[in-house]
């Protein structure tokens, strides 16, 4: 018998290629799903547990804020913008107001700036605590949720005490801030200032938050399963993160130490001593850990601000009817979720001619098709959760 | 009077009816007790109060209220569903739980049926529920349900082998596969097998958690991933069946672990005539201790990934269980 080498090779190859031919399934994750943070929809082609070609579908929460802003006056727009990223409503207001003040060339009193800074950092703490609450839940551990939300309530109570709103403070005015109630008695003329005892209570709350953060750290970071689920999962290299416009803690977790608080001057951050925590590998674990460290830095900033808060007026002199002079400006700020920017075009009217909102979550989720290619379904949830986006911030 | 009762219960059909009644009452009762314990314990662990209003004090009637609510709900079956399979699945899951009760010795002479291959029966029946889960996942005509069902089937491959291997050590020590015989072997040995079979006990409990699809192995349900897994399309009393089966299964599997490793109804230092009556209480107390540990895990740990369970089972649990068998066998031959 003559062995035909070609035939042998052909047979061996054909036997390899006869694999089980299985059909891929299209899986629709969302818009109604327990862990898509609202109404994000992912369309994925899944082969067993592995997902390919994941396409995010957005727009289910579009509210047209950019268009609405064109038919409203500047003070009215703050009500809109603190509904963009509702987890940190206060932080959204500041850059918008600063943009208007920049065009008006108003110097904001120092005390008002300090109050803005304290409340912005509080918003950051509350936003990161929501992440600390929801992320273990997405990995299947329900208990840290309650501890993190309990601490967040402390911070929200303080925010409410000053502004009157837990989620939507609507507190900034052009030229300063306007507390909900003052420290004066009912018989005397009410002086608009921070509520009595606010600074002492804040100091107390910050101490408690520090303890709680250590508690959460030991509860979550000491857990082998959490480490196994997050370490090395969803690695985002710095150059990819930068090219997709990923910002905030997600970018810093990839090892890029870029923080707008160190670069921009929308609030007097240069007066304070704080560090910018960065991650090493850019995986889910680093994104969790960077946010934990950021809470500690925010506590540090708030403590310094309470120590150094100057006295003085809360409001600069502004005309009764505010008309912003013709011009355009872009103000960007380091929000809890990442870079938040407002491009403001004024034609001299009471409201903006055009307002372009650059929201952090929108750019952050643009990475999803890249980062979710070929991952397991449980990891889709782990990675999505670690990016910490809010659908209001994506769709505006 | 006593002789009349003895005569009555020596009748096969009467005693069968009596046993069926006990099982029929025991499953919902145990399910409710464990369900309530889970609610209250999870509340304690999470700085909450838990059920508070139903029944007046501690919300003790919460589970009854929940049960009544489930029965009032509309019985929804998806239009595309495979109706007979969809209806049969919860029954099968509950039946496997009930059948497990048969071989558990509650006291020196209190056992529904002392099978000579009791351990084998228990392990075989306990994996029946996975078929019910697979049926539920398949028949729901829902992609999430299907994935949940398939995950359950994949999980079966992972935990079934360690589960079987873990009990072999206890069987070697007892030299019998009868559940009552294993307890008696522990009584005559004077110590519960867990002392020399700790590895077997630990492997058994981990595998039992996987069998129960509870955290950290609740991948077939995986709320944050698969919505509710194979339960997604179930509502009303069919959902209640699954729910009840989960809680009752916690009880039965823990009771098997207690019987095999913790001495069952026996407690050292208690005279035999007291044990005859206190046996069931001792067994239930030990069982609830294990149930508590399961609840504790449920509210403390996150969820493994499917592939991590496989590697845990094949790379850690199976070798451990095999080593345990080898060492036990050697010691048995050398010392016994």
Image (spheres, coloured by chain):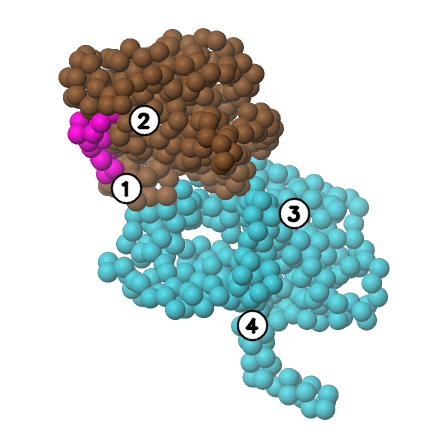
Region in magenta = A57-74
For residue B189, the mark is: none
Is residue A304 shown in magenta?
no
Residue behind mark 2: A361
Give how far apart the Cα atoms at labels 3 and 1 are.
44 Å
N-term mark: 3 or 4: 4
Q: Is residue A104 left or right of residue A231?
A: left
Q: Residue at x 45, y 60 (%)?
A: B242
Residue behind mark 3: B201
Give how far apart the Cα atoms at labels 2 and 4 are.
54 Å
Instruction: Evaluate whether label 1 is on the same chain as label 2.
Output: yes
* Chain B drawing hue: cyan
Residue at disc 4, secondary structure:
helix
Residue at disc 3, secondary structure:
helix
To which quarter of the image does residue A329 belong? top left
Q: Chain of mark 2?
A: A
Where does the image place residue B37, in percent across and percent down from the top left?
A: 59, 56
Residue behind mark 4: B25
Say few, some or many: other residues with alpha carbon within 10 Å of mark 2 (under 14 / 14 to 19 / 20 or more). Answer: many
Give how far apart the Cα atoms at labels 3 and 4 are.
29 Å
Residue at disc 1, secondary structure:
loop
Instruction: Evaluate whether label 3 is on the same chain as label 4.
Output: yes
Q: Residue at x 51, y 48 (%)?
A: B214
Say few, some or many: other residues with alpha carbon within 10 Å of mark 3 (under 14 / 14 to 19 / 20 or more). Answer: many
Where does the image place residue B246, in percent across and percent down from the top left?
A: 50, 57
Give how far apart the Cα atoms at labels 1 and 4 are.
43 Å
Q: Vertical placement of B178 versus A233: above or below?
A: below
Say few, some or many: other residues with alpha carbon within 10 Å of mark 4 (under 14 / 14 to 19 / 20 or more). Answer: few
Given residues A170 and B21, the one toward you in this image is A170
């Amino acid at each position: 018998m003559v062995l035909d080498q070609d035939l042998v090779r052909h047979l061996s190859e054909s036997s390899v290629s006869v694999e089980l031919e299985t059909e891929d399934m299209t899986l629709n994750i969302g818009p109604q799903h327990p862990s898509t943070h609202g109404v994000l929809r992912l369309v994925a082609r899944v082969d067993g547990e592995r997902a390919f070609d994941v396409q995010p579908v957005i727009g289910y929460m579009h509210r047209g804020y950019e268009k609405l802003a064109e038919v409203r006056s500047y003070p009215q727009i703050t009500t809109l913008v603190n509904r963009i990223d509702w987890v940190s409503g206060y932080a959204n207001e500041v850059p918008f107001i600063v943009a208007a003040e920049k065009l008006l060339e108003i110097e904001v009193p120092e005390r008002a700036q300090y109050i803005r800074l304290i409340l912005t950092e509080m918003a950051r703490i509350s936003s990161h605590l929501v992440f600390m609450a929801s992320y273990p839940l997405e990995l299947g551990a329900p208990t840290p949720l309650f501890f993190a939300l309990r601490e967040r309530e402390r911070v929200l109570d303080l925010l409410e005490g000053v502004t009157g709103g837990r989620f939507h403070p609507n507190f900034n005015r052009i030229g300063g801030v306007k507390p909900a109630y003052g420290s004066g008695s009912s018989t005397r003329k009410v002086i608009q200032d921070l509520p009595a005892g606010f600074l002492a209570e804040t100091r107390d709350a910050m101490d408690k938050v520090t303890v709680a953060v250590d508690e959460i750290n030991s509860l979550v970071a000491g857990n082998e399963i959490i480490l196994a689920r997050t370490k090395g999962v969803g690695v985002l290299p710095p150059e990819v993160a930068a090219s997709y416009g990923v910002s905030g803690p997600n970018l810093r977790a990839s090892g890029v130490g870029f923080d707008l608080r160190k670069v921009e001057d929308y609030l007097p951050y240069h007066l304070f001593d704080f560090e910018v925590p960065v991650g090493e590998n850019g995986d889910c674990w680093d994104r969790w850990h960077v946010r934990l460290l950021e809470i500690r830095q925010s506590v540090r900033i708030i403590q310094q601000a309470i120590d150094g808060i100057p006295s003085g007026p809360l409001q600069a002199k502004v005309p009764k009817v505010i008309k912003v002079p013709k011009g355009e400006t872009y103000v960007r700020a380091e929000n809890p979720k990442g870079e938040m920017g407002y491009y403001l075009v004024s034609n001299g009217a009471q409201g903006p001619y055009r307002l372009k909102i650059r929201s952090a979550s929108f750019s952050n989720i643009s990475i999803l098709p890249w980062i979710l290619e070929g991952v397991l379904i449980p990891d889709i949830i782990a990675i999505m959760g670690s990016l910490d986006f809010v659908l209001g911030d994506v769709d505006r | 009077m006593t002789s009349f009762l003895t005569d009555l219960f020596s009748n096969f059909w009467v005693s069968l009816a009596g046993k069926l009644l006990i099982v029929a009452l025991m499953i919902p009762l145990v399910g409710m007790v464990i369900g309530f314990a889970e609610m209250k314990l999870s509340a304690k662990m999470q700085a909450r109060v838990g059920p508070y209003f139903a029944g007046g004090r501690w919300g003790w009637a919460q589970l009854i209220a929940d049960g009544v609510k489930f029965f009032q709900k509309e019985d929804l079956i998806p239009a595309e569903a495979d109706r007979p399979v969809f209806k049969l699945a919860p029954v099968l899951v509950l039946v496997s739980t009930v059948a497990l009760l048969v071989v558990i010795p509650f006291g020196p002479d209190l056992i529904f049926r002392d099978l000579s291959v009791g351990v084998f029966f228990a392990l075989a029946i306990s994996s029946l529920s996975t078929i019910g889960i697979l049926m539920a996942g398949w028949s729901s005509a829902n992609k999430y349900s299907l994935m949940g069902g398939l995950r359950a089937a994949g999980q079966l491959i992972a935990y079934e082998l360690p589960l079987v291997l873990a009990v072999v050590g206890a069987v070697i020590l007892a030299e019998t596969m009868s559940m009552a015989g294993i307890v008696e072997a522990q009584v005559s040995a004077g110590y519960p097998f867990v002392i020399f079979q700790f590895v077997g006990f630990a492997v058994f409990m981990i595998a039992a958690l996987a069998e129960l699809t509870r955290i950290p192995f609740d991948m077939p349900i995986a709320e944050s991933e698969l919505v509710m897994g194979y339960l997604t399309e179930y509502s009303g009393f069919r959902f209640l069946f699954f729910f009840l089966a989960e809680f009752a299964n916690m009880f039965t599997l823990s009771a098997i672990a207690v019987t095999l490793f913790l001495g069952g109804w026996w407690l050292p230092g208690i005279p035999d005539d007291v044990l005859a009556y206190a046996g069931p209480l001792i067994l239930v107390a030990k069982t609830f201790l294990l149930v508590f540990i399961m609840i504790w895990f449920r509210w403390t740990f996150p969820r493994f990934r499917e592939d991590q369970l496989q590697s845990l089972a094949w790379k850690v649990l199976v070798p451990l269980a095999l080593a345990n068998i080898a060492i036990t066998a050697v010691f048995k031959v050398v010392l016994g």
